[in-house]
Image (cartoon, rainbow, N blue to C red):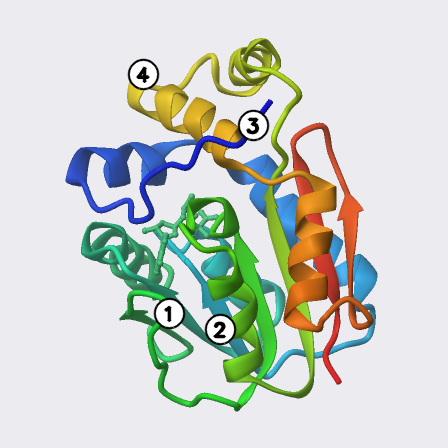
Amino acid sequence: MDRIPEPELMDEVEQARAYAAADFSEPHQAFVEHFRQRFADYNPKQVLDLGCGPADISIRFARAYPQCTLTGVDGAAAMLALGRDAVSAGGLQSRVELIQVYLPGSLPKAGSFDTVISNSLLHHLAEPMVLWDTLKANASEQAVVFIMDLLRPDSQAAAHELVERYASDETEVLKHDFFYSLLAAYRLEEADVQLRQAGLVNHLQVELVSDRHFIVWGRLY
Ligand SMILES: C[S@@+](CC[C@H](N)C(=O)[O-])C[C@H]1O[C@@H](n2cnc3c(N)ncnc32)[C@H](O)[C@@H]1O
């Protein structure tokens, strides 16, 4: 099945609310656990979360690594408003900052991030190299990189099955977004081509971690 792109920003209030209210506890906690397993004994200090949305992963990550500070970046004001509320409710304002930047765009503290994370941004980008270029422009030397995204299924029927299996109790808005996100997602071999094009293929590896997610992880030069 060919990829069908979807809009980049999730800037509609209803869409952002549906996303923030959905139960992503399993994949989002898995994100943190996959990171911990692959970087055992590593202690992130300055973390950049690209496409942070309503900051559920930013918050989980900041709690898992209490010595880090985290900068979350998103282009959608509606998502960031929900994210800032969640950061305040979690008492993390002193360690987690969320900023509005449409990528590619320049970020404060470029080059200082020892850890770059991102979940489900890649499949939104009209030009996927924006993710890899942003990561190269903002990570410090030998930074740790951990990206997770959806995997495009073989067919629309398979995408419908995944929506029913994992989102049957969610709102129609959320189910719609999940379905179209699956159609917009990349395949492992496409992610591999992107890494080659970015000159990152010797540093980062692509790994399938579930029936609908893959990760790209490693350390920069
Ligand atoms: C599916 S959400 C993922 C949010 C969060 N990482 C999570 O896992 O819950 C993707 C986010 O990427 C943001 N986004 C998409 N394209 C972007 C761009 N070019 N610049 C900045 N943010 C972007 C969207 O606004 C949205 O909040």
Q: Name the residue tied to disc 4.
A: 172
Residue 12 vs 155, above or below: the answer is below
Please indicate whether residue 172 sits to the left or right of residue 214 in the image.
left
Tell me the distance, in whole angstroms, between the alpha carbons under discs 1 and 4: 31 Å
Mark 4, Cα crowd under 10 Å, few <14 / some 14-19 / many 20+, is few
Mark 1 and ligand 1: say if the CB distance to the nearest ligand atom is below 8 Å.
Answer: yes
**Looking at the image, do the residues carrying marks 1 and 4 touch, with CB atoms under 8 Å apart?**
no
The N terminus: image quadrant = top right
Pinpoint residue 207: horizontal percent, then vertical percent: 79, 48
Disc 2 vs disc 4: which is toward the camera?
A: 2
Mark 4 and ligand 1: say if the CB distance to the nearest ligand atom is below 8 Å.
Answer: no
Q: Mark 1: which amino acid?
A: Pro
**Looking at the image, do the residues carrying marks 2 and 4 touch, with CB atoms under 8 Å apart?**
no
Residue drawn at 35 percent across, 81 percent down: 106
Q: Name the residue tied to disc 1.
A: 104
Tell me the distance, in whole angstroms, between the alpha carbons under discs 3 and 1: 25 Å
Residue 2, label in figure: 3
Tell me the distance, in whole angstroms, between the alpha carbons under discs 2 and 4: 33 Å
Tell me the distance, in whole angstroms, between the alpha carbons under discs 3 and 2: 26 Å
**Looking at the image, do the residues carrying marks 3 and 4 touch, with CB atoms under 8 Å apart?**
no
Mark closer to the chain start, 1 or 4 = 1
Q: Name the residue tied to disc 2.
A: 134
Mark 3, Cα crowd under 10 Å, few <14 / some 14-19 / many 20+, is few
Q: Mark 3: which amino acid?
A: Asp
Mark 2 and ligand 1: say if the CB distance to the nearest ligand atom is below 8 Å.
Answer: no
Please indicate whether residue 7 sits to the left or right of residue 38 in the image.
left
